[in-house]
Image: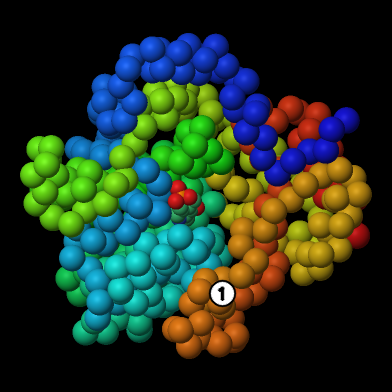
């Protein structure tokens, strides 16, 4: 048997191979490759899926984040609150604009601990960036209340939470702007880089649409200094296919996660928890163990691959040394960084592969 990898993108391709191949040919033969019919159709379909009014396709999830803060006018001198245990791109989306990230510890669901936000709000705070990490929606109601009370913008990082809901409402639709990544390994993945923002604000949607194309709506009439963050036709075409199967893809992952939760039984392993009023779309199945290196080695011997999301929290990375945050400044974030481990869970994973993972974890001492 082949090694069981943490993710298998080829399986995701093989699932709908004919559709992807036909779409590739269709776009190649169309003679139109960037921002065209496929992109417009995908934007409409994705907005519909999320139940947002507008979607604007972009070149990556990071672009969605930094452009979101840019069009909201958040930059130098401003502070944005974000959880400490996020992927570093969330933080870069803030700092590319010159704004300062203010880190808050995560809760037991790996999302921002809402009870620790208020103490971090200052005169300079302009926004909260809610990251729905690993596929589970954050605790939105208290976040919305704080935004209202302190007149803060809410931006959502939904790079891992396509289709995840809080009390029946999709992540990405709670604040001013929802930011999505369609990087190949995400729950809705392209075959290259891609991203999008969603919003219910037509002015913000227009601003992003102009910004992504050198600040112009009409060719050669540049209204602002924008960027090039356009979405390719071929990627949008692939995304439309994947989106049309989203329910099935989501269900497949949920089934595997449910099985893991039921059958993984080892006192040394802390399983992920699900908040009662949200849906989890299982971008990652993240366990926690004290003796992580030993477990990684043990699984590796059994030909099971794992990944750590994420071993170095942003505040301790070299890139953010300038923030002056030392080890010990975010103890829960740091403990998670030392103990989290993502086990294999992907579309197209066989039951036999799942069984091997479960048995290996259960036999570890
Ligand atoms: C993947 C990811 C991003 C960045 O998306 P890219 O498309 O890789 O730029 C941002 N935030 C989170 C939480 C992510 O997982």
Left or right: 182 as drawn, with respect to 297 = left
Residue 72: image x %, image y %? 19, 61
Q: Alpha-carbon neighbours of circle 1 within 10 Å: few (<14), some, or many (≥20)?
A: few
- Is 199 on the left-hand or right-hand side of 23? left
Q: Nearer the viewer, residue 101 or 360?
A: 101
Coordinates of residue 63 in the picture (x, y in percent): 35, 52
Residue at 69% over, 53% down: 307
Against 6, is 238 above or below?
above
Determine the residue positioned at 81% across, 29% down.
352
Residue 238 falls in which quadrant of the image?
top left
Q: How many marks?
A: 1
Residue 186 in the figure: left or right of residue 258: left
Element marked by disc 1: loop
Residue 166 vs residue 313, the one in the foreground: 313
Left or right placement of residue 107 versus residue 143 in this view? right
Where is residue 58 drawn, in percent x and y?
33, 42
Q: Would residue 169 be visible to someone looking at this image? A: no
Can you give x and y, in whole percent of width and height, for residue 13 in the image? 59, 24
Residue at the spot x=34%, y=56% of the render? 65
Mark 1, residue position: 317
Residue 287, compared with residue 165, is above or below; it is below
Q: Name the residue: 86% across, 43% down.
A: 303
Foreground residue among 196 and 268: 196
Q: Residue lying furthest front in this view? A: 220
Instruction: Look at the image and tell me whether residue 39 can be seen.
Output: yes
Color theme of the render: rainbow
Q: Quadrant of the C terminus?
A: bottom right
């Amino acid at each position: 048997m082949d090694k069981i990898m943490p993710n298998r993108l080829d399986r995701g391709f093989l699932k709908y191979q004919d559709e992807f191949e036909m779409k590739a040919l269709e776009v190649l033969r169309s003679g139109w490759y960037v921002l065209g019919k496929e992109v417009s159709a995908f934007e409409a379909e994705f907005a519909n899926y999320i139940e947002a009014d507008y979607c604007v396709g972009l070149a990556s999830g990071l672009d969605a984040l930094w452009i979101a803060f840019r069009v909201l006018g958040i930059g130098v001198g401003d502070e944005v609150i974000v959880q400490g245990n996020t992927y570093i791109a969330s933080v870069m989306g803030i700092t590319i604009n010159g704004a300062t990230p203010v880190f808050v510890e995560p809760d037991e669901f790996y999302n921002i601990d809402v009870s620790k936000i208020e103490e971090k709000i200052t005169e300079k705070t302009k926004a909260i960036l809610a990251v729905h990490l690993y596929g589970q929606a954050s605790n939105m109601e208290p976040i919305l209340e704080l935004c209202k009370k302190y007149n803060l913008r809410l931006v959502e990082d939904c790079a891992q939470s396509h289709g995840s809901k809080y009390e029946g409402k999709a992540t990405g639709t709670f604040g001013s702007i929802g930011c999505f990544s369609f990087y190949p390994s995400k729950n809705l993945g392209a075959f290259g880089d891609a991203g999008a923002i969603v919003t219910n604000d037509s002015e913000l949607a227009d601003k992003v649409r102009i910004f992504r194309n050198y600040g112009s709506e009409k060719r050669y009439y540049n209204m602002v200094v924008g960027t090039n963050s356009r979405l390719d036709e071929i990627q949008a075409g692939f995304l439309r296919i994947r989106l049309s199967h989203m329910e099935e893809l989501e269900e497949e992952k949920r089934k595997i996660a449910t099985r893991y939760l039921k059958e993984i039984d080892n006192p040394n392993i802390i399983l992920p928890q699900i908040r009662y009023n949200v849906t989890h779309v299982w971008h990652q199945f993240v366990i926690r163990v004290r003796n992580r290196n030993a477990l990684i080695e043990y699984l590796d011997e059994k030909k099971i691959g794992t990944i750590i999301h994420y071993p170095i929290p942003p505040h301790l990375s070299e890139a953010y040394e300038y923030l002056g945050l030392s080890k010990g400044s975010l103890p829960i974030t740091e403990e998670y960084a030392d103990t989290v481990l993502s086990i294999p869970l992907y579309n197209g994973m066989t039951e036999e592969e799942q069984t091997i993972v479960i048995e290996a974890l259960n036999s570890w001492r």
